[in-house]
C-alpha cells in the first residue's frame, strides 16, 4: 500500500484565526471598539434609516415601543428611535471633538510646562485655578452668557478638561526629561524645539491616547448633563440629555423615552471607557498594574 | 601635544545643605591620540568633570565656578550655548554608562545616528543614513542596513553600547569622553567594547578620556591616569608608573582592594585577603582644610589635617598630593 498521505503543511493563520487571537488578547479593546463603531455608523447614516426626529404626530402621542415605533413616541408624538439615533450624533461629535481639542491644547501646554520652568510656574497656577471651578457651573455660566449652540457647548466642556491633560503631559515630560537618553541627546548637541518635538513628544503619546478616551467619556456625560439642565445644545437639536429631560414629566406612563436614551448614553460611555482601559493595557502595561 | 587642557576646574553644586564642591581645582592635559583614565570611587567628581567639559551641568543646581577648559586653544567656559552645541557631539562626544536607557525607545537606531550627522555635518538625511549604516558596520553590528530600522528594545545591551559608540563617533570627534562605558555590561562584552573603542580611536585619530572606577579597565586601555578623591586630583602618572609605584595612600588602597590571580594565598598570607579602605568618602559640603583623605589614611599626621598637600612631582612625570610619599614608598618596599 502506497503510504501517500497529505503532508501536513503548516498554513499561515487565516485572517479569522488572527482576529480571534487579537480578540482573546484584548477583549476590552474589541468590545469597546465594536460598540463604538456601530454607534458611529448608525449616527452617520441616521437621516436615511430613521424618520424626521422633529416631526410631530399628535395622534400618536406616548405610544409604547411597537413595530411602527421601535422605541415608542414621546408626549408630542415624536419618534423616540429617530431622536435617539440623531442624539448619538451630538454625543459622538461632542465626545470626539472635546477629546481632540483638549488633547491638542493640553499636550502643547503640558510640553511647554514640562520643559520650561518659567512657563510651568505660570501655566500650572492657571490650571489649578480652572480645576477649582466646578465644570458644570463653568459651562452653565459660559452658555448663559452667549447664544446656545453646539460650538459654545464644546468650548465650555473643553476648558475644564484641559488641565487634566496638561497635568498628565507635564508629569510625563518631567519624568522623560531625566532619562539618560535625553541627557545623551543633549550631549550630542540637541536642544530646544528639536529635543522637545523629536525626542520627548513621541514618548508622551501612549499615556495621552489613553487619557483622551477618558476625556471623551467624561465630555459625553457633561454634555448630557448640560442638555438635561437646558444649558446644552438648543432643544431643536435632539440630544440624549434633552430627550431625557423632556421625557422626565411623563416617566411613569412613558418610561421608554427616558430609559432608551439613558441606556444608549450608558452603553456609549462604557464602550469608550472599555476602549480606554484596553488601550492602556496594550500601550502601557506598567500603568495597568499600578492602577 | 595637548588637545584639551583643563586648569583649576571647579564645579560647585548649590544644595540646601550648602555648597557641594564636586570638582575642586582639577587640572590635567589630554594629549593627541592619548587615552587618559580618570579613576576614583563614586562621588569623587569624575563624572562631574566630564559633564563640565561639555558644559552639561544643570544650571538650576550647579555651575562651573572657576578654572579654564581649553580645547584646541579655544576656551570652552566662555563660549555661548549656541557655540557649545556645535562642539557637543561634533568635536567632543560622550558615551554614557547605561546603554539600556541611553537610546530613545521611540526612535529607530538609524534616526538616532543620522540626526547627529545631519546636525553637525550639514548633509542630507539620505546621506546621513548612509553614514549611519557605515558607522554600524564600523562598530561591527551585522546586517547594518536592517538594524537602521530597528528600535533599541530589539538590541542587546552590548549592541546598544555599540550603537552609542557609533553615534558618538559619527562626526569624527577629536575627543571622546566615555563615562563608565562598560560598567553595565557583563565581563565578556566589556572586553569587546573596550577593544572596539581602542581600535576605532586609532582609526578616527581621536583622544579618549576614560572615566572608570575599574583599575582593570585602566590598565588595559589608558596611557596616563588621573586619580581623583573628593573633587581633587590626588595623583597623576603613566599607567606603568602608577601600577609599579603608587605614591598616594589612596591609590595604594584602591590597588589592594583588587582581587589578584597571580598572588598565591598561602604564599603571601597577609596580602591574600582583600583590604578595604576604612571609613567613608567625606561629605562634599564640608569645608576640608587639610588633605581630604587624612581621616582614612594610615599615614596621616597632624600636618595632614591642618594643611592641604600640594601636588609634588616626586618622581619624573609622577605627581602626587601627599605629605608623606617617602613613608608610603618605605612601607611598599
Image: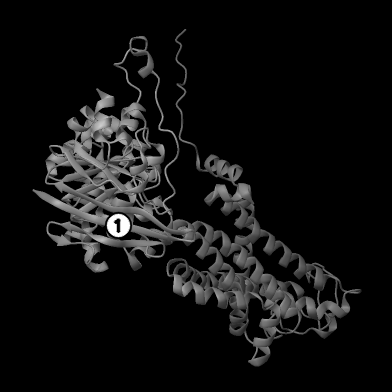
Q: Nearer the viewer, residue A135 or A75?
A: A135
- Residue A96 image-quadrant placement: bottom right
Q: Residue furthest top?
A: A1
Residue B241 seen in the current view:
yes
Q: Position of residue B330 (x, y in %)?
A: 25, 26
- Left or right of residue A201: residue B215: left
Q: Nearer the viewer, residue B329 or B179?
A: B329
Q: Nearer the viewer, residue B291 or B198?
A: B291
B154 to A162, vertically: above or below? above
Crowding at dot 1, Cα within 10 Å, few <14 / some 14-19 / many 20+, comes out as: many
- Residue B268 image-quadrant placement: top left
Q: Secondary structure at mark 1?
A: strand
Image point (40%, 43%), residue name: B153
Q: Residue furthest front?
A: B302
Image point (40%, 50%), residue name: B105
- Left or right of residue A269: residue B300: left
Q: Position of residue A180 (x, y in %)?
A: 39, 51
Residue A49 seen in the current view:
no
Q: Nearer the viewer, residue B310 or B87?
A: B310
Q: Position of residue A169 (x, y in %)?
A: 51, 64
Disc 1 designates what residue? B10
- Left or right of residue A240: residue B12: left
A143 to B276, vertically: above or below? below
- The count of marks equals 1
Task: Tell me the quadrant of the picture where the C terminus of chain B can be found.
Answer: top left
A120 to B163, vertically: above or below? below
- Residue A112 image-quadrant placement: bottom left
Chain letter belonging to callout 1? B
The structure's colour scheme is one colour
Amino acid at each position: 500500500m502506497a503510504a501517500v498521505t497529505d503532508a501536513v503543511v503548516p498554513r499561515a493563520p487565516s485572517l479569522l484565526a488572527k482576529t480571534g487571537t487579537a480578540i482573546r488578547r484584548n477583549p476590552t479593546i474589541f468590545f469597546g471598539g465594536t460598540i463604538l463603531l456601530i454607534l458611529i455608523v448608525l449616527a452617520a447614516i441616521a437621516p436615511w434609516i430613521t424618520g424626521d426626529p422633529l416631526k410631530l404626530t399628535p395622534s400618536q402621542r406616548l405610544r409604547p415601543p411597537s413595530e411602527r415605533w421601535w422605541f415608542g413616541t414621546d408626549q408630542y408624538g415624536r419618534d423616540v428611535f429617530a431622536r435617539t439615533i440623531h442624539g448619538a450624533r451630538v454625543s459622538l461629535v461632542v465626545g470626539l471633538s472635546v477629546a481632540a481639542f483638549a488633547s491638542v491644547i493640553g499636550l502643547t501646554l503640558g510640553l511647554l510646562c514640562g520643559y520650561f520652568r518659567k512657563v510651568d510656574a505660570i501655566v500650572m497656577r492657571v490650571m489649578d485655578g480652572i480645576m477649582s471651578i466646578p465644570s458644570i457651573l463653568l459651562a452653565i455660566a459660559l452658555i448663559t452668557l452667549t447664544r446656545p449652540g453646539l460650538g459654545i457647548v464644546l468650548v465650555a466642556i473643553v476648558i475644564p478638561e484641559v488641565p487634566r491633560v496638561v497635568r498628565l503631559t507635564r508629569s510625563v515630560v518631567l519624568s522623560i526629561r531625566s532619562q539618560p537618553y535625553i541627557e545623551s541627546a543633549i550631549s550630542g548637541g540637541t536642544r530646544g524645539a528639536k529635543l522637545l518635538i523629536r525626542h520627548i513628544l513621541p514618548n508622551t503619546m501612549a499615556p495621552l491616547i489613553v487619557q483622551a478616551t477618558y476625556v471623551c467619556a467624561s465630555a459625553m456625560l457633561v454634555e448630557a448633563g448640560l442638555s438635561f439642565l437646558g444649558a446644552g445644545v438648543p432643544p431643536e437639536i435632539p440630544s440624549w440629555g434633552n430627550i431625557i429631560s423632556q421625557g422626565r414629566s411623563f416617566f411613569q406612563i412613558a418610561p421608554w423615552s427616558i430609559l432608551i436614551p439613558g441606556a444608549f448614553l450608558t452603553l456609549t460611555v462604557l464602550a469608550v471607557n472599555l476602549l480606554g482601559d484596553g488601550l492602556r493595557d496594550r500601550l502601557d502595561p506598567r500603568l495597568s498594574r499600578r492602577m | 601635544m595637548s588637545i584639551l587642557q583643563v586648569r583649576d576646574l571647579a564645579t560647585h553644586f548649590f544644595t540646601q545643605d550648602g555648597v557641594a564642591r564636586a570638582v575642586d581645582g582639577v587640572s590635567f592635559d589630554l594629549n593627541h591620540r592619548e587615552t587618559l583614565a580618570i579613576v576614583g570611587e563614586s562621588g569623587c567628581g569624575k563624572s562631574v568633570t566630564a559633564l563640565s567639559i561639555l558644559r552639561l551641568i544643570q544650571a538650576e543646581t550647579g555651575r562651573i565656578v572657576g578654572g579654564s577648559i581649553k580645547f584646541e586653544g579655544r576656551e570652552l567656559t566662555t563660549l555661548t550655548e549656541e557655540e557649545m552645541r556645535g562642539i557637543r557631539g561634533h568635536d567632543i562626544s560622550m558615551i554614557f554608562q547605561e546603554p539600556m536607557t541611553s537610546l530613545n525607545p521611540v526612535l529607530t537606531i538609524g534616526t538616532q545616528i543620522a540626526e547627529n550627522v545631519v546636525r553637525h555635518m550639514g548633509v542630507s538625511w539620505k546621506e546621513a543614513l548612509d553614514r549611519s549604516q557605515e558607522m554600524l558596520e564600523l562598530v561591527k553590528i551585522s546586517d547594518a542596513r536592517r538594524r537602521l530600522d530597528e528600535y533599541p528594545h530589539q538590541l542587546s545591551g552590548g549592541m546598544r553600547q555599540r550603537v552609542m559608540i557609533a553615534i558618538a563617533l559619527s562626526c569624527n570627534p577629536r575627543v571622546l569622553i566615555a563615562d563608565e562605558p562598560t560598567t553595565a555590561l557583563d565581563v565578556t562584552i566589556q572586553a569587546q567594547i573596550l577593544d572596539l573603542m581602542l581600535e576605532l580611536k586609532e582609526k578616527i585619530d581621536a583622544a579618549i578620556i576614560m572615566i572608570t572606577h575599574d583599575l582593570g579597565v585602566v590598565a588595559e586601555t589608558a596611557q596616563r591616569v588621573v586619580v581623583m578623591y573628593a573633587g581633587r586630583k590626588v595623583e597623576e602618572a603613566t599607567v606603568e608608573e602608577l601600577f609599579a609605584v603608587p605614591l598616594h595612600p589612596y591609590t595604594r588602597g584602591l590597588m589592594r582592594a583588587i582581587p589578584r590571580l597571580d598572588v598565591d594565598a598561602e604564599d603571601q598570607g597577609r596580602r591574600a585577603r582583600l583590604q578595604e579602605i576604612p571609613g567613608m568618602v567625606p561629605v562634599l559640603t564640608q569645608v576640608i582644610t587639610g588633605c581630604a583623605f587624612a581621616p582614612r589614611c594610615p599615614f596621616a599626621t597632624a600636618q595632614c589635617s591642618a594643611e592641604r598637600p600640594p601636588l609634588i612631582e616626586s618622581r619624573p612625570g609622577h605627581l602626587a598630593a601627599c605629605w608623606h610619599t617617602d613613608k608610603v614608598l618605605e612601607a611598599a618596599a
